[in-house]
């Protein structure tokens, strides 16, 4: 992809609160009125409809030693290593209870450990978790195993264990390399720690290195972030995720001590980032993600097999996701369900012999149609009406007549091109993909949807 030119005026015009669409409908719609009985039926239905089709597994490992003040994750701050041992016991319990519902003809195509900081766990604890999983599931010969790494709590030994139990992709949490910025957000991490982690991962044979950065943090400037990007490019990552700092102090109290950048400062950093990475051999996939032109993510986007789910973009089309651990969210084509978000409640449900599912949502036919439409739009950056009609078994143009008409203004702003047969997102439109997707979201007007982070 050639260097992407960014129009700041247009970004400013469309900078409104909006969902990130890792699910549709979004999590605020999940309800605690749906119990495990209903979910169990959805899993059985998925086993029947998707017999032999692969699945993804996600494990939420919530512990961190210290809170980064910008953090938006569901985590538990503790210094006690005993917490990890206890949590492993409960994860094993949950696996024991849930696994029998998942048909054994469904192999694992993707495994992900997220958090919190999976690196909080000691090498032998992660090895143990690997055993719990491999005892119960069959894996495909070629599967993707990804783990999130905090360079402050990882070690060479831990990385060797990740490789040993089958992880072939790491996401290294760098955020920024400017010490002043890191100090302001209570994340003291040296350049050396990040560089060393990249080296250890390569030496352990991890094939894909992903660097996670964050823009919009206090004290960041174009000059400081430019230097960070230069150093990150020297790591030669396969993917770079540059997450938008979401300032939501009404949800995340610690953020209240931070003074976020002014929108124009934040946008200038975003412009710099996109232009720099796309002129250095990276494709802007959309929604904060960049990948080398030869990376599977970029190729999947080209081949229209890219997917979007709770872990962001994925190359594994349509796999159900079974998630374990507190707050984790699972999904099939027709349902989402989330575990207890509080650690003690998660434990207490398991102690009572209950599956710790707390909230859920069963998709209506209209939800499924809109879900597919939004996901295809965000992954393929186009909607071919004929293809969508076939995929969804509807007359797509007729079904979405008002939505397509509402896109006229975005068309005249150069975000997309509308033709009688398709809708195509322009390079500029990639940046505002959330706004375009919002046109197909029927729930946006409802009250509980009001407090999303801003789209830029
Ligand atoms: S290490 Fe990650 S999950 Fe933990 S507090 Fe920092 S940002 Fe949040």
Image: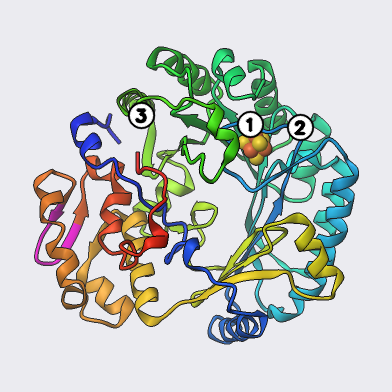
Identified at 41% across, 16% down, the residue is 221
Asked if ligand 1 lies within 8 A of label 2, the reply is no
Image vertical order of residue 269 relative to residue 147, above or below? above
Number of numbered discs: 3
The image quadrant of residue 81 is top right
SS at mark 1 in the image: loop
Q: Looking at the rendered structure, which numbered label has been put on residue 154?
A: 2
The local crowd at label 2, few if under 14, some if 14 to 19, many if 20 or more residues have their Cα within 10 Å, is many
For marks 1 and 3 on the same chain, the one whose residue lies earlier in the sequence? 1
Closer to the camera, 142 or 259?
259
Q: Are marks 1 and 2 in contact (CB under 8 Å)?
A: no
Residue 47 in the image: above or below residue 317: below
- Label 1, ligand 1: CB separation under 8 Å: yes
Residue that badge 1 annotates:
68
Quadrant in which the C terminus appears: top left
Q: Is residue 306 left or right of residue 423?
A: right
Mark 3: give few (<14), some (14-19) or many (20+) Cα within 10 Å.
many
Percent of width and height locating residue 141 = 67, 61
The residue beneath circle 3 is: 270
Please state the extent of the stretch shown in magenta in the rendering: 417-423
Query: Seen in the image, is 84 located left or right of residue 263?
Result: right
Q: Is residue 455 left or right of residue 30?
A: left
The quarter of the picture where residue 46 lies is bottom right
Q: Could you say whether the residue bearing mark 2 is in a helix, strand or loop?
A: loop
């Amino acid at each position: 992809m050639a260097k992407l030119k960014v129009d700041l005026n247009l970004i400013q015009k469309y900078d409104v609160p909006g969902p990130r669409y890792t699910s549709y409908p979004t999590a605020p719609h999940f309800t605690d009125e749906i119990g495990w009985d209903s979910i169990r039926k959805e899993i059985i239905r998925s086993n029947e409809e998707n017999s032999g089709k692969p699945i993804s597994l996600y494990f939420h490992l919530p512990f961190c030693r210290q809170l980064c003040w910008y953090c938006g994750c569901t985590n538990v701050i503790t210094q006690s290593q005993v917490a990890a041992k206890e949590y492993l016991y409960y994860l094993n319990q949950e696996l024991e209870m849930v696994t029998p519902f998942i048909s054994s003809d469904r192999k694992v195509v993707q495994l992900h450990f997220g958090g919190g900081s999976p690196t909080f766990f000691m090498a032998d604890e992660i090895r143990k978790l690997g055993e719990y999983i491999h005892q119960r599931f069959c894996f495909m010969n070629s599967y993707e195993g990804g783990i999130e790494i905090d360079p402050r709590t990882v070690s060479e030994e831990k990385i060797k264990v990740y490789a040993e139990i089958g992880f072939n992709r790491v996401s290294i949490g760098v955020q920024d390399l400017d010490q002043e910025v890191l100090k302001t957000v209570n994340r003291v991490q040296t350049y050396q720690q990040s560089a060393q982690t990249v080296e250890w991962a390569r030496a352990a044979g991890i094939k894909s290195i992903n660097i996670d950065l964050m823009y919009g943090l206090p004290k960041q400037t174009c000059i400081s972030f430019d230097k960070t990007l230069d150093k990150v490019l020297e790591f030669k990552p396969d993917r770079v995720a540059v997450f938008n700092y979401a300032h939501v102090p009404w949800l995340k109290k610690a953020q209240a001590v931070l003074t976020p950048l002014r929108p124009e400062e934040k946008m200038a950093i975003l412009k710099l980032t996109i232009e720099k990475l796309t002129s250095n051999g990276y494709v802007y996939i959309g929604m904060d993600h960049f990948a080398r032109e030869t990376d599977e993510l970029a190729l999947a986007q080209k081949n229209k097999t890219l997917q979007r789910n709770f872990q962001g973009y994925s190359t594994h089309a349509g796999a159900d996701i079974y998630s374990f651990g507190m707050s984790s969210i699972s999904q099939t084509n027709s349902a989402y369900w989330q575990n207890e978000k509080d650690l003690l409640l998660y434990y207490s449900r398991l102690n009572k012999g209950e599956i710790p599912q707390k909230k859920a949502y069963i998709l209506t036919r209209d939800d499924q149609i809109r879900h597919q439409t939004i996901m295809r739009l965000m992954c393929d950056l186009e909607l071919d009406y004929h293809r969508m009609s076939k995929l969804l078994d509807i007359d797509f143009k007729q079904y979405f007549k008002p939505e397509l008409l509402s896109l006229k203004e975005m068309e005249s702003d150069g975000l997309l091109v509308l033709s009688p047969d398709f809708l195509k997102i322009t390079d500029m439109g990639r940046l505002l993909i959330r706004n375009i997707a919002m046109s197909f979201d029927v729930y946006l007007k409802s009250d509980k949807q009001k407090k999303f982070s801003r789209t830029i």
